Amino acid sequence: MELIDAKSADSILPRSPVSHGSQNAAGIRAAVQAAATRAQRKLLAEAVEDKGSPLCGDRPEELDFRNGRIVRKGEPESGESFTAFLARNGNVPVGAIASIKPDQDAPQYWTYS
């Protein structure tokens, strides 16, 4: 978790609902989840292309995340740590941005945390 840098309420980010405490948490959950999924896919794609990675040449769909590591599915000791991957690649952050447009019918189903 200490490696995650989440940003909110920045004018360079996609538009989002006004923050109203717990309502904001419910309103942006889908966008946060989509951005996290994109960042994971990006990290896996970079790992399999990285000639210095023990996962070079693998297919992204064969990989998983376990205990701060990128590993082959079913092989928790394989692969490498996120920090080792990032250090070898100049500590350039791997991130993604996502925005979600509300469904027209969603208001009748909205709930708040």
Image (cartoon, grey):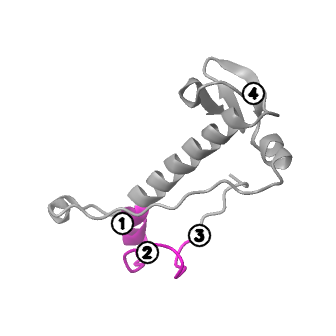
In space, the residues marked 4 and 2 are separated at their CA atoms by: 40 Å
Asked if labels 2 and 4 touch by Cβ distance under 8 angstroms, the answer is no
Label 3: which secondary element: loop
Residue annotated with mark 2: 21
**Residue 72 magenta-highlighted:** no
Label 2: which secondary element: loop
- Hey, what amino acid is under mark 2? Gly
Q: Which residues are magenta?
A: 7-28
- Hey, what amino acid is under mark 4? Gly
In the rendered image of this protein, does residue 8 appear above or below residue 1?
Answer: below
The circle drawn on residue 79 is 4
Rendered residue at 64%/44% (across/down): 43
Asked if labels 3 and 1 touch by Cβ distance under 8 angstroms, the answer is no
x and y percentages locating residue 80 in the rendered image = 78, 32
Mark sitting earlier along the chain (1/2): 2
Rendered residue at 68%/27% (across/down): 71
- Hey, what amino acid is under mark 3? Lys
Within-10-Å neighbours for mark 4: few <14, some 14–19, many 20+: many
| Picture quarter with the C terminus | bottom left
In space, the residues marked 1 and 2 are separated at their CA atoms by: 10 Å
Asked if labels 2 and 1 touch by Cβ distance under 8 angstroms, the answer is no
The circle drawn on residue 7 is 3
Visible in this render: residue 67? Answer: no
In space, the residues marked 3 and 4 are separated at their CA atoms by: 29 Å
Visible in this render: residue 51? Answer: yes
